[in-house]
Image (spheres, rainbow, N blue to C red):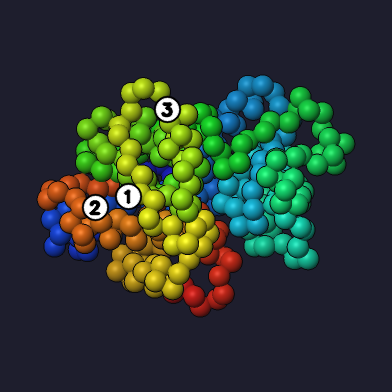
Amino acid sequence: MNLKDQIPLTSLKKLYQPFGVEADVLRLDQVHPIVSGNKWYKLKEYLSEAERLQKKVLLTFGGAYSNHIVATAAAAKAKGFPSIGIIRGEKPITLSDTLQDAADQGMNLFFIDRSSYHLKIIPPEVWRLYKPGEVFIVPEGGYGSLGCQGAATILKEVNSPYSHIAVAVGTGTTVAGLASAASQEQKILGVVALKSYVEMEGAINNLLSDLHAPILLFHDYHFGGYAKKTPQLISFMNDWFRDTGIPSDFVYTGKLFFAVDDLIRKNYFEKGARLLLIHTGGLQGNRSLPKGTLIF
Ligand SMILES: *Cc1c(COP(=O)(O)O)cnc(C)c1O
C-alpha cells in the first residue's frame, strides 16, 4: 500500500488564536484515496498476521456505509488477498456507493439479517468457498489489540509536543492506540460517536496495558446516537469547511470538530494549550446524505 510519506497538518491558528490555544489537524484523510484515515493503521497489523498465518482470504463485517469495509477491501487487494464482506441487512437492489467501491476492489459481499449480524454469523455460502482454517477474520471496525498496535503508529507521523490529542471514538481502538503511544503528560480526548455507550470505557481498557496517557471521554456530542445527525451538526460542518477548508463526516469527525470547537469556546483548555485533532478520514457516511446537504 502506497501511503503519502508526510501526513499534512492543517493549522487552525486563525480560528482559535483569539482563545489562547493552538490547534492543528493531522490529515489522515489524505493518506490514501480509498483507505483513508485511521482504518489503514488499524488494519495493517491484521494484514501482517494474516500473511504470517498464510491465510487465503480476509473476512470482515460492516454496514452499507462502512469506512471499515471499503478500507479492508482496498487494503486486502493491495496485499494480494481476496476479501469477503459480511454486510448488515438485506441485499439492496442497487448497492450503496460504498459497497460498490468495496465490490470494485474485489470484495465478495454477503448480506445477512440484523440478528445474525449481531451474532456475527458467517453464512454457509462462505464455507462452500473456503475452509475455516483459510479465513482470517478481522473483527468489526478493526477492534482488537492488533488494531490498537497499528493505531499507535499514527503518532509516529507527528513531531511537535501537543498537550492534548483529540479523536472521534467508534470502537475505541484508535483512542487506545493513541493513548498507548502518547507520553504520560499528554491528554487524550475521545469524542464518542455513540449514544450512552457505557461499555466504552471497558472496551478501551481491555486494549491497554498499565502505562498509557490519560484518556478523557466525552459522551455528550453524539447528536442523537451512532450515525445520527441534527441540522445543527450539518450546519457546523459546512461552516467549519468554509472556515478551514477541511471536510468532515457526520458520523465521526463532524462530531469531533464540533466538540473541540465547543470546548475551546467554553474555555475548557488552559491558555497556551496545544491541541492536535486527528482527522480520521472516512467520509463514506456523507454519501448517504441527499445531494446539496453539504457544500463540499
Ligand atoms: C472508524 C472511524 C472512527 C472510529 O475509530 P475507532 O478506532 O473504531 O474508535 C473514527 N473516525 C472515522 C472517520 C472512522 O471511520
Q: CA distance from mark 3 to mark 2?
A: 27 Å
On the rendered structure, is 179 left or right of 141?
Answer: left
**Residue 242 quadrant:** bottom left
Q: Which residue is mark 3?
A: 208
In this rendering, the answer to whether 289 lies above or below 17 is: below
Q: Amino acid at mark 1?
A: Leu
The response on whether ligand 1 sits within 8 Å of label 1 is: no
Residue occupying image coordinates x 41% and y 35%: 176
Q: Which residue is mark 1?
A: 277
Residue 267 in percent (x, y) is at 17, 56
The response on whether ligand 1 sits within 8 Å of label 2 is: no
Q: Quadrant of the C terminus?
A: bottom left
Q: Tag 2 or tag 3, which sits nearer the N-term?
A: 2
Q: CA distance from mark 1 to mark 2?
A: 7 Å
- The numbered disc on residue 23 is 2
Q: Amino acid at mark 3?
A: Leu
Crowding at mark 1 (Cα within 10 Å: few <14, some 14-19, many 20+): many
**Depth check, front residue: 5 or 292:** 292
Given contact means CB atoms under 8 Å apart, are the residues at marks 1 and 2 in contact? yes
Q: Tag 2 or tag 1, which sits nearer the N-term?
A: 2
